[in-house]
Amino acid sequence: MDLLLLEKTLLALFVAVVLAITISKLRGKRFKLPPGPMTVPVFGNWLQVGDDLNHRNLTELAKKFGDIFLLRMGQRNLVVVSSPDLAKEVLHTQGVEFGSRTRNVVFDIFTGKGQDMVFTVYGEHWRKMRRIMTVPFFTNKVVQQYRYGWESEAASVVEDVKKNPESSTTGIVLRRRLQLLMYNNMYRIMFDRRFDSEDDPLFVKLKALNGERSRLAQSFEYNYGDFIPILRPFLRGYLKICKEVKERRLKLFKDFFVEERKKLASTKSTDHEGLKCAIDHILDAQQKGEINEDNVLYIVENINVAAIETTLWSIEWGIAELVNHPQIQRKLRNELDTVLGPGAQVTEPDIQKLPYLQAVVKETLRLRMAIPLLVPHMNLNDAKLGGYDIPAESKILVNAWWLANNPANWKKPEEFRPERFLEEESKVEANGNDFRYLPFGVGRRSCPGIILALPILGITIGRLVQNFELLPPPGQSKIDTAEKGGQFSLHILKHSTIVLKPRSF
Ligand code: HEM
């Protein structure tokens, strides 16, 4: 055992020397690297900056080192970009060069080394997957086919909340019910099915496995083994759990959803285009030999993570801000009553007539960006950015949160004030028409789900505000909006109890 330790220590020293030489070479004349804190052998900057590279910590580092800086996290290069101009360079002008993704030891497991779409490098496989997913998920036809389903899911939340006497007295953790809504919104699209209640055993299982996957992937716990390869043996236990969760999850998708749908398709005619759900289209692509069975399951995996959690977090943040800003809540309710007439329930086509509702959604996505650093980008080859050399395979983080919350670019950005999107920022849209505001990214790797997320947010938040007065629990003047960040996610730390008082029309 001691011998093994000695061997490891010697190896570490050897790697340290090699790394120190490489860095000094890289920092030398040939390579002009972006500025950054001084590195130490083996660990790079890891000991100084720590594990939690959240948008706020990276903002502090940007204030010190500038709009582009480099962190060396053990063997990994991490380049952080913090200005609209550099964001434009990464996402648009040099969109191909920086259009790949990095994974780490854990994401390698959950995506089968990039057999999915979200975490695959920029190339043929990504292009094919994005094309195959577009018709079943990301068109206006899909929105028009499923919006009735989303409206009915929101109506059933309203109904369930009204039925529960606690809602209007001590309050409820609304998030739990909203989670069911989001699963149903997406499982209707994917598999043309829904779950009846929060206690549905399959829903409970699915939620638990998805939750575990997110926790394991977004945690900082495994950074040391990812950054410093010689420490990887110590991660064996963690990675084993990841593998088990991944296997169980894909098996659940296969046995209970994909196979079920196949069975149904063989007994029913699903030829009629209008009745096809997403998985039917995806299975067609598999049958044509364009993708394999694993790719099918990774598409289901991607939607479970990329679509459900992000939108759920955003709804939760929106509701939290409205609870804490009663005058904004009243103003929104007033708009809904005035434009639609009291009691008329908001539908998808109504949203375009409701500018304040749209502004509330935009402001939520600005202040409480669900993916504040975008999904990490990567350059496959050596590249240039902002006059610096970027070594191949660097992880490129665009601090989209800071772009949208930098007081140099926004008036009092720390305030939740939807009016900004009707007044001084009235031309700014969520689709990336302004590089200061990129909640869904922009360019080749931008979020294709924006077309679904915006109407779902509008319908859900709109219906809740129309039907209830949303309040903090008795004895509290505000709910806690502390944040919890992960590798690149941001959600509310505590799922607060809120009181929902039904309105009488
Ligand atoms: C409020 C909700 C959502 C937010 C804030 C959000 C945000 C994002 C962001 C920031 C990215 C990365 C952009 C980049 O790296 O440049 C992304 C990628 C992605 N999102 Fe979303 N998203 C949301 C909802 C959805 C939904 C509903 C779906 C699917 C139905 C979806 C599917 C995807 C996919 C597949 C990618 C990967 C695209 C690629 O790598 O080519 N997202 N999203």
Image: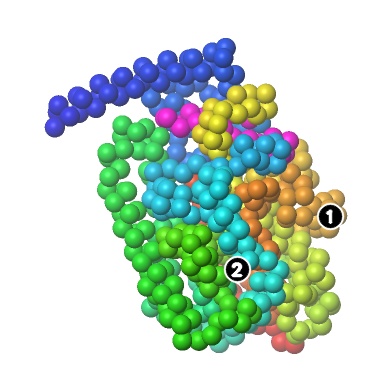
Looking at the rendered structure, the kind of residue marked 1 is: Ser
- The residue positioned farthest toward the front in the image shown: 288
Q: Badge 1: how crowded within 10 Å, few (<14), some, or many (20+)?
A: few
Judge from the rendering whether residue 372 lies leftward or rightward of residue 104; answer left or right: right
Q: Nearer the viewer, residue 193 or 435?
A: 193
Q: Residue at x 36, y 17 (%)?
A: 17
Q: Where residue 489 sits: x, y (%)?
A: 53, 51
Q: Where residue 425 sits: x, y (%)?
A: 82, 51
Q: Where residue 409 sits: x, y (%)?
A: 77, 41
Q: Residue at x 43, y 43 (%)?
A: 104
Q: Mark 2 or mark 1: name the one nearer the start of the chain.
A: 2
- The residue positioned farthest toward the top in the image shown: 29
In magenta, the rendered stretch is 68-88
Q: Which residue is mark 1?
A: 426
On screen, residue 3 above or below 128: above
- Total marks shown come to 2
Q: Residue at x 41, y 69 (%)?
A: 253
Q: Where residue 24 sits: x, y (%)?
A: 48, 15
Residue 141 seen in the current view: yes
Query: Which quarter of the frame holds ligand 1?
Result: bottom right
Q: Nearer the viewer, residue 188 or 2?
A: 188
Residue 474 seen in the current view: no
Q: Which mark is residue 136?
A: 2
Q: CA distance from mark 2 to mark 1?
A: 32 Å
Q: Nearer the viewer, residue 168 or 20?
A: 20
Please, what secondary structure does the residue beneath circle 1 have? loop
Please, what secondary structure does the residue beneath circle 2 have? helix
Q: Residue at x 48, y 67 (%)?
A: 287
Quadrant hosting residue 248: bottom left
